[in-house]
Amino acid sequence: PERYGVVEFDSDARVVSIEEKPVLPRSNWAVIGLYVYDNDVIQIAKGLKPSARGELEITGINNAYLERGQLSVQRMGRGFAWFDTGTPDSLLEAASYVATIEKRQGLKIAVPEEIAFRKKFITAADLERLISDRYAKNDYGRYLRSVLAEG
């Protein structure tokens, strides 16, 4: 994980530290880069100073929330796959993985409308309206119709 930010947890799964690209990682938990912040992040970001690598690091924001006692980290265990897509080869690897899963299982990966519907953030009528307004004549819309039919 030394190519990424690394998070260290205590025995109660609370975050102890986060380091950006450490030479000697304190754990095997990489920070994969899916972040949700409140509006305080704007002021925190404005106050960031460049790291030793000369970059403004997202880890600086995460550490600010850690210092405030407001950092929450979700571990992604079995059933999750994450790919770094920072190089052409790694982007191709991720795309191939998604294509294989979708083709073999007949499912789409990370469809926001499907997730919203299954979590009851939107109703069947909302999903139908989205399909009709945006996706009526394409494969994405046909997939969403199958989700709607499943209920």
Image (tube, rainbow, N blue to C red):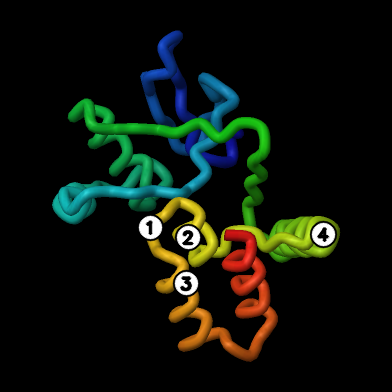
Give percent across and percent down for residue 139.
Answer: 69, 80
Q: Is there a contact, CB below 8 Å, between mark 4 and mark 2?
A: no
Instruction: State which mark lies toward you, 4 or 1.
Output: 1
Q: Nearer the viewer, residue 54 or 104?
A: 104
Q: Quadrant of residue 109?
A: bottom right
Q: CA distance from mark 1 to mark 3?
A: 10 Å
Q: Could you say where residue 9 lies in the image, as x and y percent from the top left? A: 44, 19
Residue 117's tag is 2
Q: Splitting the image into 4 quarters, where does residue 122 fall?
A: bottom left
Contact, mark 1 vs mark 3 (Cβ under 8 Å):
no
Mark 1: which secondary structure? loop
Tag 2 and tag 1, C-beta contact below 8 Å: yes
Q: Measure the C-alpha gap from mark 4 to mark 1.
A: 29 Å
Instruction: Confirm whether residue 89 shows in the render.
Output: no
Residue 111 horizontal side relative to residue 106, left or right: left
The residue located at (65%, 50%) in the rendering is: 83
Instruction: Work out which residue is located at the far top of the displayed protein and give it.
Output: 11
Q: Which residue is mark 4?
A: 100
Q: Position of residue 55 (x, y in %)?
A: 38, 52
Front tag of 4 and 3: 3
- Residue picked out by circle 3: 127
Circle on res. 121:
1
Q: Residue at x 42, y 54 (%)?
A: 120
The quarter of the picture where the C terminus appears is: bottom right
Mark 3 falls on what kind of element? Answer: helix
User: Relative to residue 134, is residue 38 depicted above or below?
Assistant: above
Which numbered disc flags the more N-terminal residue, 4 or 1?
Answer: 4
